[in-house]
């Protein structure tokens, strides 16, 4: 287990002025559809992205929605999961590359949603593939988000840092220590302070510059 704390290198996001400027964000991983619904404000009973309690992935094709951060409009693209054992990680990464290349103004952020309670050799290999496939320039736009964290980990991010295995800790350092926690709605209702704080932290990590076509 890695016990070293991740230094905070990201800057506070300034408030932007002017009209809506749509800019894509990509979300992929385990629990990504749930996070996508949180980000666009589509809460339980009104989900934009289909979710399931089953282990297998629900998302088979890319889908999109719109979210606002400080009155700025963003397009959010939900992709098939990187850890989808049916499709494999390489075809998913190729789809992500296609989406980036179709975005005339680039992509603001790539959110990789990672299940907090388990870490397999397959996931370790996927992290290595992400680094190699997306390239060095993409590391400034990647945000790692932990899903399915328990109450203690969500309430206290220091506990989440302590619980990370070394491979995940190293990956977080490579991407500039940009990481957050997607609150578990079974533990934290949307009107609870912890839910709002953790979601806001993720939004504040979005870089102001875009990842250009690969």
Image (tube, rainbow, N blue to C red):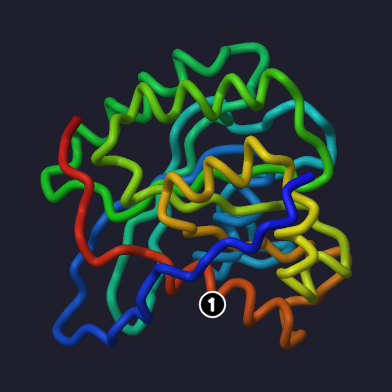
Question: In what quadrant of the picture does the C terminus appear?
Answer: top left
173 left or right, relative to 101 = right
Left or right for 106, reference 40: left
Residue 15, image x, y percentages = 28, 87
Q: Is residue 178 above or below residue 103?
A: below
In the rendered image, the vertical position of residue 67 relative to residue 144, given as above or below: below
Neighbour class for label 1 at 10 Å: few (<14), some, many (≥20)? some
On screen, residue 42 above or below 95? below
Left-right relation of 149 to 65: right
**Residue, disc 1:** 200
Residue 180: image quadrant is bottom right
From the top left corner, tell me how far across and down residue 195 is, in percent.
71, 77
Q: Residue at x 80, y 65 (%)?
A: 159
Q: Nearer the viewer, residue 138 or 158?
A: 158
Which x, y percent locates residue 63?
45, 40
Q: In the picture, which quadrant includes the N terminus?
A: top right
Q: Count numbered badges in the picture.
A: 1
Q: Which residue does the image show at 48% across and 35% down from the upper left?
A: 79
> Along the horizontal axis of the image, is 192 left or right of 126?
right
Q: Position of residue 39 (x, y in %)?
A: 52, 65
Residue at the farthest front position: 4
Rendered image quadrant of residue 9: bottom left
Residue under the image location 35 percent in, 83 percent down: 70
Name the residue: 52% across, 66% down.
7
């Amino acid at each position: 287990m890695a016990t070293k704390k991740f230094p905070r290198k990201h800057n506070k996001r300034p408030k932007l002025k002017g009209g809506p400027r749509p800019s894509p964000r990509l979300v992929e991983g385990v629990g990504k559809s749930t996070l996508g619904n949180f980000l666009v404000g589509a809460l339980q009973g009104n989900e934009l992205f289909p979710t399931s309690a089953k282990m297998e992935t629900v998302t088979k094709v890319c889908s999109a929605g719109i979210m606002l951060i400080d009155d700025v409009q963003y397009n959010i693209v939900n992709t098939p999961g990187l850890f989808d054992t049916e499709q494999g990680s390489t075809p998913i990464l190729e789809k992500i590359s296609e989406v980036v290349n179709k975005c005339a103004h680039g992509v603001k952020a790539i959110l990789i949603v990672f299940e907090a309670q388990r870490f397999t050799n397959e996931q370790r290999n996927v992290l290595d593939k992400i680094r190699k496939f997306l390239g060095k320039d993409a590391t400034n736009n990647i945000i790692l988000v932990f899903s399915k964290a328990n109450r203690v980990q969500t309430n206290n991010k220091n506990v989440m840092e302590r619980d990370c295995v070394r491979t995940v800790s190293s990956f977080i350092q490579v991407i500039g220590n940009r990481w957050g926690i997607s609150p578990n709605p079974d533990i934290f209702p949307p009107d609870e302070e912890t839910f709002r704080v953790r979601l806001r932290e993720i939004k504040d990590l979005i870089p102001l510059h875009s990842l250009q076509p690969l």
